[in-house]
Amino acid sequence: MGAILSSHVPIHVRGRVLPNYAIIDSDDKIPFWRVVGERVHEHGCAFLLQLSHSGRQRDIPGVENATHPALSSTDRPDPVHGLPAQRLSPREIADIVAMFGHGARRAREAGLDGVELHACNGYLFTQFLSSAINDRTDEYGGSLENRARFLLEVMAAIRREAGTDFHLQVKISAVDHGDAFFPWSRKGNTLEESIQVFRWAEDAGAHAIHVSTGNCFPHPLNPAGDFRPGDLIGTYDTMLSSGRSTLRNYVLWRFRPTRPLMRYIWTRTVPENLEGLLLPDAEQVRRNVSVPVIVTGGFQTASVVREAIRAGQCDAVSIARPLMANPDLVHQWAAGADRPERPCTYCNLCLFHAPEDPLGCYDTRRYGGDHDRMIAEVMSIYRPDGWSSDLQQPEPASANPQ
């Protein structure tokens, strides 16, 4: 891979999505991120830190936030899980803007290659940008220019703290698709509105644009794919205390009579062909900006990626799930394979397991139905010898106390 992009790294503990995510909220975190960057650089690869703040999209608050409501552009809960929110004051907005600047400065001091602002998928930036979420009447709400003010202020703070030569890219949902789950919900931002935001971001110093979709997470179109309610309930119970609607969702997903309904609601807008789903949006964005355009979208076929770049639809692609399924994907391409022998099935079990379990592929179909083999590969990330398939058993305790 040309670069590794981290998952969302909060600039403050109140901006965590999950309590087990690493953060960059103080200078004492710099040594940790320096080591991470050095390990990636050993392989001739760049490392970008994705700076984020959850806003109300905080799945599991954690003990630090148990008594602190999530901060947001609004005080309305999110429509899917009912995650509560507290409207930010202008003073609190200014504090968070400064935190993003400090986070970028720390990333630079750690020797990392740049940062990306996670301004998509329902997190805090989206909560300001989206016309379906932002209900403010002050200078941060109303017009598109006002809704983009928070993002542009953060970019200016990063430029002051980390310098204009430090790589900065912005990931934005090109289209909100706010009605993808509940058809009566507001649709939110259009592609035309987001293109204007991308132009403003370029003028503010963005070195690259990263195109995503959806104004919540998870979203039917991000990560698009299968949705099996029976698999979700294994970890969704962790979220029961997080939102007002989580118990309702759990009950509807838990029992067989209502599972088909929930699956239909979630997948009704998902197209049959998922790979390159966002290429049309990326192509329109690329026609309107002069900086490189990156796009996400389930890429795992070499010819699809090659043609997208050749046709000018994008300058690069980002890959997540297919690299969890096949960490050696680019080596398979280099060896002549157009598609991996065991491709990602877009089942989203990696996402469903994320709240409680190690990151990895949990689709037993890719392992011939062998559950133990699957677990061995998932847990192999903790082994220094790499992708071992052997399940090591502990030595029996000695009967001799000496």
Image (cartoon, grey):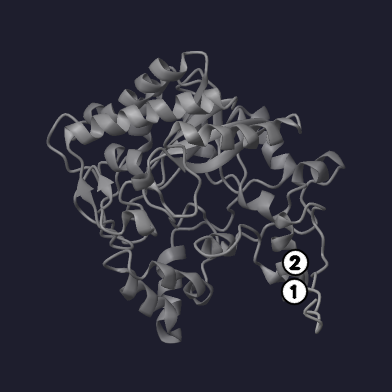
Q: Secondary structure at mark 2?
A: helix
Q: Position of residue 353 (x, y in %)?
A: 55, 65
Estimate how packed mark 2 is, as few (under 14), some (14 to 19) or many (20 or more) residues with alpha carbons within 10 Å: some
Q: Is residue 22 something that shows in the picture?
A: yes
- Residue at the limit of the structure toward the top, as seen here: 164
Q: Quadrant of the C terminus?
A: bottom right
Location of residue 375 (image quadrant): bottom right
Q: Position of residue 392 (x, y in %)?
A: 80, 69
Q: Position of residue 166 (x, y in %)?
A: 52, 18
Residue in the foreground of this view, choosing between 364 and 48 = 48
Q: Position of residue 219 (x, y in %)?
A: 43, 55
Q: Which mark is residue 372?
A: 1
Q: Is residue 203 something that shows in the picture?
A: no
The residue located at (16%, 29%) in the rendering is: 139
Task: Provide the residue designation for mark 2.
Answer: 376
The residue located at (48%, 27%) in the rendering is: 106
The residue located at (33%, 24%) in the rendering is: 152
Separation of residues labelled 1 and 2 (CA atoms): 6 Å
Is 111 left or right of 329, judged from the image as shown? left
Q: Secondary structure at mark 1?
A: helix
Q: Is residue 107 above or below residue 242?
A: above
Estimate how packed mark 1 is, as few (under 14), some (14 to 19) or many (20 or more) residues with alpha carbons within 10 Å: some
1 and 2 marks in contact (CB < 8 Å): yes
Is 304 left or right of 113, judged from the image as shown? right
Q: Amino acid at mark 2?
A: Ala
Q: Quadrant of the N terminus?
A: top right
Q: Amino acid at mark 1?
A: Asp
